[in-house]
Image: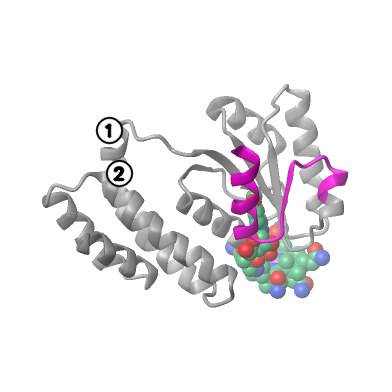
């Protein structure tokens, strides 16, 4: 449908105002929120994720597309909730204690949201206790930890230990520039993400 294609194309090019206007027009013409999400926004975000993975798009393009998606979702979210539309799963995500770097974490949250996940973003420098409390509160399908410092990446292991000691068996995905698969194995992480898109791909396989 033409208007859904326009939403997709404008999202890919990061035109937030146009995506908002088109979202409203689509609703006015009787399209339902779920169709706009699935065939417009998510299709667009998939293209953005693919282009980012292939090195054709860089962080600014992804951020602009994400902003357009967020603005449209502000309109659609209440309607989706009313219609009882199911998310693919919930991701609880945060940068670990002592670490203020949040760009990679935000990018991961954006791509997971684009892949149909509900995101509970705890922000940066999140304490072990907060991860545990929020995991109990939201019962997520996946817990995402990010770290950019060689000093703070050690806190990832402590979060996983704390979760397991509290009988929270939710799979944990870890990512961040200093991490390796070996490190992820050593702290008993379930998934190592070498990039945000790698994380989404591996999570979809792990949760299927
Ligand atoms: Co800082 N910093 N920084 N910094 N910073 C680095 C990380 C550093 C490598 C720079 C350097 O020295 N060359 C270095 C770390 C050295 C080390 O530990 N070995 C460093 C340092 C030392 C520091 C301070 C200690 C500096 C100081 O104050 N003396 C300080 C620490 C503050 C703190 O955290 N307590 C500090 C502060 C800052 C700023 C606040 C100024 C700013 C952060 C702003 C912000 O995030 N809001 C900043 C920045 C911007 C950087 C660099 C330049 C860029 C990081 C970044 O955002 N990259 C960085 C140097 C560099 O990398 N060139 C540096 C882009 C981002 C998209 O990549 O986060 O790796 P990244 O995410 C990737 C993947 O890793 C993955 O997906 C993304 C791509 O797809 N990923 C996930 C990440 N998390 C994931 C989670 C997932 C899945 C994938 O699922 C859960």
Q: Quadrant of ligand 1?
A: bottom right
Q: Give the percent coordinates (x, y) of residue 115.
A: 48, 50
- Report the residue that reaches farthest toward the bottom: 56
Q: Which mark is residue 110?
A: none
User: Residue, x 77% and y 60% (percent of image)?
Assistant: 149
Q: Which mark is residue 34?
A: 2
User: Residue, x 30% and y 38% (percent of image)?
Assistant: 80
Q: Secondary structure at mark 1?
A: helix
Q: Give the quadrant of the C terminus.
A: top right
Q: Give the percent coordinates (x, y) of residue 137.
A: 55, 26
In terms of secondary structure, what is the magenta stretch mainly? helix
The segment highlighted magenta reads 184-208
Q: Would you identify the image quadrant in which residue 172 lies?
A: top right
Q: Give the percent coordinates (x, y) of residue 33.
A: 26, 45
Q: Nearer the viewer, residue 130 or 138?
A: 138
Q: Which residue is mark 1?
A: 83
- Report the residue that reaches farthest toward the top: 167
Q: Is residue 189 magenta?
A: yes
Q: Give the percent coordinates (x, y) of residue 71.
A: 32, 56
Q: Is residue 194 left or right of residue 196?
A: right
Q: Is residue 101 visible?
A: no
Q: Nearer the viewer, residue 36 or 76?
A: 36
Q: Is residue 100 above or below residue 191?
A: below
10 Å crowding of disc 1: few (<14), some (14-19), many (20+): few
User: Residue, x 32% and y 34% (percent of image)?
Assistant: 81
Q: Nearer the viewer, residue 49 or 78?
A: 49
**Given contact means CB atoms under 8 Å apart, are the residues at marks 2 and 1 in contact?**
yes
Q: Is residue 120 visible?
A: yes
Q: Is residue 183 magenta?
A: no
* Sequence order check, earlier mark of 2 and 1: 2
């Amino acid at each position: 449908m033409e208007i859904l294609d326009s939403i997709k194309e404008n999202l890919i090019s990061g035109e937030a105002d146009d995506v908002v206007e088109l979202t409203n027009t689509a609703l006015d013409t009787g399209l339902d929120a779920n169709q706009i999400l699935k065939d417009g926004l998510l299709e667009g975000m998939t293209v953005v994720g693919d282009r980012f993975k292939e090195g054709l798009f860089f962080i600014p393009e992804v951020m602009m597309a994400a902003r357009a998606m967020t603005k449209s979702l502000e309109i659609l979210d209440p309607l989706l909730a009313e219609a009882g539309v199911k998310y693919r799963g919930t991701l609880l995500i945060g940068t670990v204690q002592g670490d203020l770097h949040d760009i990679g974490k935000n990018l991961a949250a954006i791509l997971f949201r684009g892949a149909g996940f509900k995101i509970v973003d705890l922000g940066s420098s999140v304490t072990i206790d907060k991860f545990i409390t929020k995991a109990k509160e939201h019962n997520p399908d996946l817990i995402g930890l990010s770290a950019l410092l060689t000093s703070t990446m050690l806190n990832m292991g402590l979060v996983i230990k704390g979760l397991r000691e509290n009988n929270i068996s939710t799979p944990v995905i870890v990512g961040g520039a200093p991490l390796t698969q070996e490190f992820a194995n050593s702290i008993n992480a379930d998934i190592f993400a070498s990039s945000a898109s790698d994380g989404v791909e591996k999570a979809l396989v792990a949760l299927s």
